[in-house]
Structure formats: structure tokens, C-alpha cells
Amino acid sequence: MKKKDFLIAGAVLLLAGVLTLVLRLSGGDPGGAVQVKIDGKVVGTYALVEEQAVPFDTDYGHNLLVIRDGKAHMEEADCPDHYCMEQGEIEKTGETLVCLPHKLVVEVVSGESSDVDVVAK
Amino acid sequence: MAVARKSPTGTPGRRVALDGILVALAMLFSYIETFIPFNFGVPGIKLGLANLVVLLGLTFLPALDVFLVSMVRILLSSLLFGNVMSLWYSLAGGILSFLCMWLLTRREGYSLIGISMAGGVMHNIGQVLTAALIVQTIQLAGYLPVLLVAGLVTGAIVGALAKLLMPRVQKALESYA
Ligand SMILES: [Zn+2]
């Protein structure tokens, strides 16, 4: 490896570090609800305090979002990659679960805004 | 990279033959890669073995040829091993990383490993930006730190492989000149 190679590595690591910090500072509060978007449109907002299982069936496919112990995770999905199910549980503001094949995004939002954001399906 | 530039592409026939060999090689790498689990919990993150072909190709073929080889590889492998969705990420990642690596090969002071690391990082940036556009969610940027580091690691591995292969490729090119 040459000197300038380390410059590249250093710059990228620095950028990753700064980004991590910014993301930590900008979010991180325990969220009040999760907002679900399909194809960029909000289809629903679900409180994290309520234990619930919410199915989403669209032309893209099936997903089952489960909220338990104040955390949300993807319980079922018939997408080809199942990455959404592997992303684990989310609970802090700004955290997301993404099912790319189904264009579905679950994002934790703060409790207050959730009432405003609810859009009838 | 100055050494590599000495080996000429030769006749148009030889150039086309080399292009074809590279496409075939890249397809082979893409196929092999489907057996290598490299899961960061985010779609589309791969080792990027096919990038070996771009790295090596840039040392003995015109940049345009290598670019086309890379694009053909992405189209074919998305059709064969992926889906329509993966085509868009791969294209965005492939184009960004190609441009970045091409620019670096034209400058002094970067080894294959450095060039490959930059390519790996740009590849992942391209993919996550495309994904963010597709699902219209800027929060996907949250994956960027992981993806940046992942790109460095995979890029370094592929770059080291390219460095190992380089002398053999040079020898082969000379013996069939
Ligand atoms: Zn999924």
C-alpha cells in the first residue's frame, strides 16, 4: 500500500465517524410510534406502547410488522431477500426497517408527531 | 500504474477479444459471489469480486472498454442472478465506482489496493443513494457509516487480490502479444 492509499482509508473512516456522531446526536431519543411508508407514501402510524401485529399486503407483497415491548420488528415477509427481517428491532427515533423489494419503510418517530401524521389507509 | 500502460492493446481484434474475455471473467466472478455470504443487513452489499476485472482491465485496456465491460457485466448478472431492482443499485454503484477508480488510475501515488478501496466505498454510496431514492427515505443515510467501512474492507480485499493477480496477468498478456 502507498501513502495516498492510507489517505483514502483515513478520509473514509473520518467521514464514517462524523456521520455516526451526527446521526447519534440528531436522533436517539426513545420514539413514541413507528410510521410506515410504502412507495414513499405514509400508510399508517402505530404507537410503540401498544402490542400489535400489523400486516401490509400490497402488489409488492406481504409484510407483517410486530410491535412488542416498545420495539418494532418485521416478523414475516415474502420478499426475496428477507433483509427486512434480519434488521432486528427498532425503538429509537430515526431508526428504520427497510424492505426494499416491497418499497416499504418503517421509521421510528417521536410520539407527539405521530397523531398528526396518521393518514387513513 | 505506469508499468501497465506499456503493454499495448494491439490490433482491434485483440482488443475485442480481451473485452470478451473480461466480460466472461466478470460474469464468472459475479456467479461465484452469489455463494459468498457477506451480509451487513443491508441489501446489495457484496464483496465486489467482479471489480477485479475493472481494476485489472484499467491497466491494459482503454477506459471506455473497461466501462462497457463493467456495464455489460452488471446488465447480464442482474438478469441472471438478480432482479430488476438490483439492476438499479448495481448500475449506480458500478458507474460511481468506475469513475472514481478511473480517475485514481490516472494519478500517481495510489496502489491497486487504494484504488479498489475508493471504488468499494463509492460503489456502496451509489447503492444506498439509489435505495434512498427508490423508497424515498433519506433515513437510509443511517446505513452510510456501516456501508463506508464495509466498502473499505471489501475494497481492500479485492485490491489485494488484484495485486496478487497482476504479475500473472502481465505475463499472460506478454506471452500472447
Ligand atoms: Zn423484505
Image: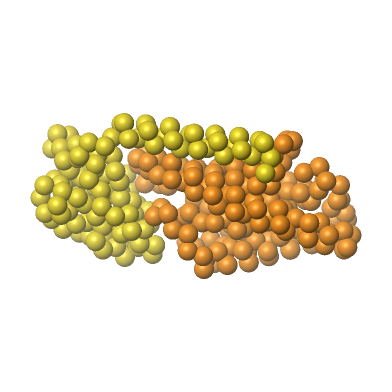
Chain colours: A yellow, B orange
Q: Is residue A38 left or right of residue A2?
A: left
Against B172, residue A38 (above or below) is above
The x and y percentages for residue B142 are: 37, 41
Residue B72 versus residue B155: which sits nearer the camera? B155
> Residue at the left extreme?
A50
Screen quadrant of the N terminus of chain B: top right
The answer to which of B65 and A60 lies nearer the viewer is B65
Q: Is residue B3 above or below residue B50?
A: above
Q: Residue at x 43, y 45 (%)?
A: B146
- Which residue shows up at 60% across the image and 58% down it? B49
Query: What residue sits 83% from the left and 46% below the top?
Result: B3
Residue A77 image offset from top left, x and y in percent: 29, 63
* Residue A39 visible in the displayed image: yes
Query: Can residue B81 be seen in this snapshot?
Result: no
Coordinates of residue A114 in the picture (x, y in percent) = 16, 38
Q: Residue at x 35, y 40 (%)?
A: B139
Q: Please count the marks in the image.
A: 0
Indicate left or right for B62 with A77 as reference: right
Residue A63 place in picture, x, y as percent: 26, 60
Quadrant of the image containing the C terminus of chain B: bottom right
